[in-house]
Amino acid sequence: MGGAIKAEVRKIFTTRLWWGLLIGDVVLGALISFAWAFQIGSDSAKQSSDRQTHLLATANPDSIASVYSAGFITSIAQLFPLALGVILITSEFRHKTWTATVLAQPKRWPITVSKIVSIVVVGIVYGVVYDIASVIGGAITLKSFRSSGLFLTSSQVLQTLALMLLIFTVWTLLGFGFGMLIRNQIAAVFIAVGLAFIGNILFNVLFDLAHWHWAPKFLPGNLTSSILNPGFNDSNSFNWWAGALVLTAYGLVLALVGSGINQRKDVL
């Protein structure tokens, strides 16, 4: 199994795909935090009646943590690891490397387990890079334009960065599971991203109209927000640790369900 996992990780990092996606990972994390940090100490933040915006009125561990996690707060950052997971597995179907692997090892579960582990490894690597890029992007604005500290020794900030890493990895797993269900790469990426972004908004509206106030907290996008913004959780939201457990369960279940269904499909 160890050899299979090493082979899967090596397969990913010996293609041009990984560094192209890594560049996108860095740019996304840095730019969003860079832009979000301009709100720290701004007049609009000080005068805002919105709790989350008013939090940015002064530089403190909570407001700086929101700068680093701004990509997830805006529901944009999670789309990257989701697409990453989809692309990594559907590329195997598209270029027939899945077929060669299955023909060499007819038992599919060891292949699936090694792929899931390799996806987790890749998710962690990209998540760490995203964390670093977010801190650098935010730091440029905070130091150059806001004369603010970075609060990198704050337990609140460190917890946020760790949770961002977990969230990034779980969303990569969600993408992997979705790619296992829909093998066509273009269709899988568009459907997955559409459901994660537009679907999250649509279901929030539908649940509100139906007065199902208990339901929105189970949506992956809302779970992400509850994990990173525990101070804004209401009685209908999960605690950050409960949200982390539920979101992780989503990632593992979808990856296993997609893999289980794929066990019965013919090799193409």
Image (tube, grey):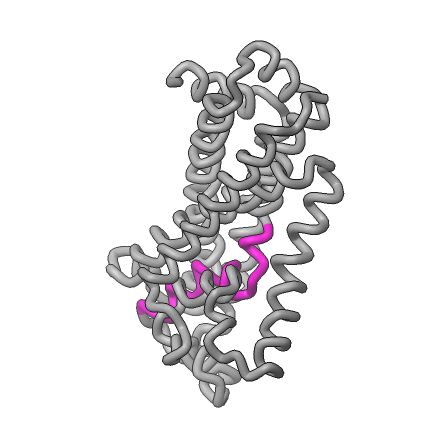
Q: Residue at x 69, y 57 (%)?
A: 194
Q: Residue at x 46, y 25 (%)?
A: 114
Question: In the image, residue 222 lies at what x, y percent?
Answer: 49, 66
* 170 left or right of 245 in image: right
* 268 left or right of 209 in image: right
Locate residue 106: give its quadrant.
top right
What secondary structure is the stretch in magenta mostly built from?
helix
* 248 left or right of 101 in image: left
Question: In the image, residue 209 lies at what x, y percent?
Answer: 62, 83
Q: Quadrant of the C terminus?
A: top right
The residue range painted magenta reads 61-79
Compared with residue 194, is residue 112 higher up or lower down, i.e. above or below?
above
Regarding residue 177, the answer to whether it shows in the image is yes
The answer to which of 11 and 234 lies nearer the viewer is: 234
Q: Residue at x 45, y 42 (%)?
A: 129
Question: In the image, residue 267 lies at what x, y percent?
Answer: 68, 21
Residue 69 within the magenta-colored segment of the rendering: yes
Q: Quadrant of the N terminus?
A: top left
Question: In the image, residue 109 lies at what x, y percent?
Answer: 48, 25
Q: Residue at x 37, y 80 (%)?
A: 235
The answer to which of 46 and 249 lies nearer the viewer is: 249
Number of numbered discs: 0
Residue 208 within the magenta-colored segment of the rendering: no
Compared with residue 103, is residue 5 higher up or lower down, i.e. above or below?
below
Compared with residue 127, is residue 229 higher up or lower down, i.e. above or below?
below
Regarding residue 144, the answer to whether it shows in the image is no
Which residue is situated farthest in the top direction here?
A: 104
